Amino acid sequence: MGRIASWLENRTGYRELMLPIHRRVLPDGPCWTLSTASCLVWLLALQVVTGLVLMTSYSPSLNNAWASVHFIEQTPAGQMIRGLHFFASQAILIVFAIHTVRVLLVAAFRPPRELIWATGLVLIPLIMVWAVTGNPLNGSQKGFSQINVEGNIIGGTPVVGPLVQKILIGGQQVGNLTLTHLYALHVGVLPLVAGLLLALHISQVYRHGLASHEGGTLSASSRPYFPYQTIRNLIVVGAVFALLAWLAYHFGAPLDAPADPELPQATRPEWYFLFLFELRGYFTGDTEFIATVIIPVAILLFLLALPFLDAMLPEAASRWMRYAVVFGGLAAWSGLTGLSMWRDHNDPHVQAEASAAHALALRADELADAQAIPPTGAAALLQNDALTQGPKLYKQYCVSCHPYTTDQFEITGSDEPSAPDLGGFATRNWIAGFLDPERIVSAAYFGNTEHAEGEMASFVKDEMDLEAASLDAVLAALVAEADLPQHHADAEAAAAGRELIAGEAGCTDCHKFHDDGDIGVAPDLTGYGSRQWLLGFLNNPEHDRFYGEYNDRMPGYDPELPTAPMNQQELDMLADWLRGQWYRPTAIEVDDQTAASPAEKPADESSDEPTDKSANSDDDSSSKADDESRDTSGEES
Amino acid sequence: MIEQTRRVWLKFTCRTLTLGYAALMLIPGVRFLVDPLMRRSTQNSEARRVARLDDLQPNVPRPFAIKGSRLDAWTLYPEETLGRVFLVRRDGDTVEAFTAECPHLGCVIEFQEDQDRFFCPCHRGVFDAEGAVVPSDQLGWNNPLPRGMDHLECEVVEDDDSGEKWVTVVFERFQHGLAQQVATA
């Protein structure tokens, strides 16, 4: 060992290179607050290591960015590495702030240390930009809308702004070039520039030594830096690393839904930029750049000039100024940040958008876990998802007449509902409402339609005479026809029900049902509520198979029509959503047979029935809840 | 003296901690990077219909593309060319299938009709019309092939509806450079 070391020493002189480290002296002895410098170097090293590992699997393109980040999260140790990278970037900002505050308080920027101060100060905005260029790389909606807003902020700067914006974004819109540009900045340009500044900063620190209260002379408590300060540094670094590892393990880095302009976005910057976000709110229009550019630059210039201002002032005034900068700065920063958070916290709209974005992120993650990403990119996951698109389509095309109430969704239009509530469509409880003399003429069913005076309503009110058990069988038969993915009917009851429908119950006097009855008078009950039936109905409710000439106001949505508002895929997703047919990580079946126990048959009592609650699994108490809401509306009318 | 011992001990602790932290930083990275080694092969051993028997002439190799879905890290390509095969109809309606991937270093093998041989252009590998390695007999040229062309499992099936005869192939990949045909792990 010794021989190898001396062989190396003879050729490289590495001991001489290490000498400054070994000779370094603490003028006032070791101190915990001095650890911030070492801590920052370690954190930057951690960023280099985790960043390089992430680079091995990350792909900066519109179609791949989100997908590759999701892939990283799935790879063993991937969540830890990405989490460390995410939390360490924020730790760097916090530790850097503490580092700067300490320098200000002890006036360590005084001659000959002006360059240490200047290089360090320039590193702060540089590191913030570094973090900002990293956030959109994951290809998430949040990251994209952040960089979009940030690009526009840059664009708001007079003269050069629009040019810089266009180059950064790589054109008019955030896209492939934005990602490659940000990536080049994040992993190439900024590390290089920051590394050079850091090298200059540290070499100056070594050249001038650590600032001392005694003004250069060694006090009695002076000690060599190594190991007395080093051990403190390492203990602090160990604690910070442990905290980061814990955060990465428990929370991981967030991954918002894949970028898609269709998604809701109440874009907020990361917490460290909220003060500028808040400040911007006090300026409007043409003057916004005062908040976003002029003020930050002015603060930076003032701080850069601090060593020279300090030299002109008497000691007492200098101390006053330094304390004013530190505590004024902290107060202003935390005041603005807190105010911004408080505003958002009390803004229901922002809160709703945030929770919607969170739900979409979870859904996208769930879908990506279940199926691989299509070549067109991860945005397609949510774009083709019935659960995500169904409610949107319903809001657009259906809710002006049909409300929709389950405990999972409550969609109401601006107008008075004028057609049946489709929440829980074709479930047992929903069909039961149709066969209930009071509920069929309530607002939740035919109450506000022509059919309130129609044959079906009068049949249910006056003619239909079924025992409870027979009604259950009929319901079971219809539930079996609908074949909803989460509801299944007892086969025996369904078989009995089918016979009743075609016979005793009298349904086939008007309705067609398999081989019995005829079409043209009332909707075909064959496959009632099935995907194929529903799509056919949505295509053309005036077809003889459905309402024919008795159709009230239901428009047809045949995608072949030149005026069709929805294409086939949208129609499919709407039908799937109405039928509760979407991907679920763990399928939970609701046995409609248990819900059919005679005890709870009178719908009004059902909500208080304890057995009825336990019969429904937590996941799908929707049919129950929507039943309740329908009951109340029925009572009112 | 006590101060002296303390300082030595502190120096030792500092060095150990430094190395320890560096190692801790690297461990998750190493685990992440070696993940491809931990992944099981995803070879799909289903038999795919590749060609109609009637489209093959006796003893004339014809190349066909094998289409299928392919998972590339995070992207699933639903319909892609997974590889190429040569189908050769032999006597009595039996069919022989070779993968077009060269057993040497994985280039794509061609069939040269004029010379009635298979040829890999990358390193001048020469197979005869039966897919066997042609012995090197030329000065200054060594046939680089470790083994003959790789056989694929192949069957002639009759379509239930049309009664047409189809050739099905189980497409697989094999390790390069070995004297035996071994599927890639």
Image: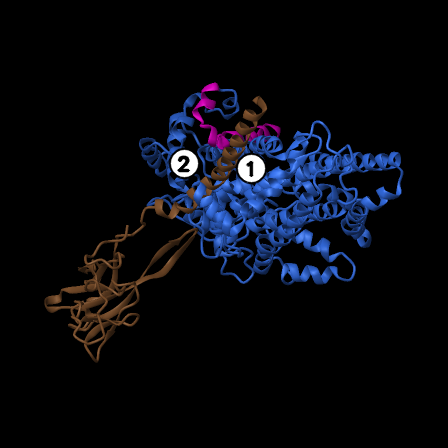
- Residue A257 visible in the picture: no
The residue sitting at the bottom extreme is: B114
Work out whether A624 lies above or below A290: above
Q: Which mark is residue A587?
A: 2
The residue sitting at the left extreme is: B92
Front position in the image: A384 or B8: B8
Work out whether B121 lies above or below B69: below
The chain letter corresponding to blue is A
> Considering the image in quadrants, where does the N terminus of chain A appear?
top left
Front position in the image: A449 or A464: A449
Horizontal and vertical percent for residue A623?
Answer: 49, 32
Horizontal and vertical percent for residue A204?
Answer: 69, 46
Which image quadrant for residue B117? bottom left
Give the magenta-colored segment's residue range: A610-637
Residue shown at 78% from the left, 50% from the top:
A297
Query: Tag 2, which secondary structure?
Result: loop
Which chain does the numbered disc 1 sit on? A
Q: Which residue is mark 1?
A: A409
Horizontal and vertical percent for residue A115?
Answer: 74, 48
Residue shown at 81% from the left, 37% from the top:
A322
The chain letter corresponding to brown is B
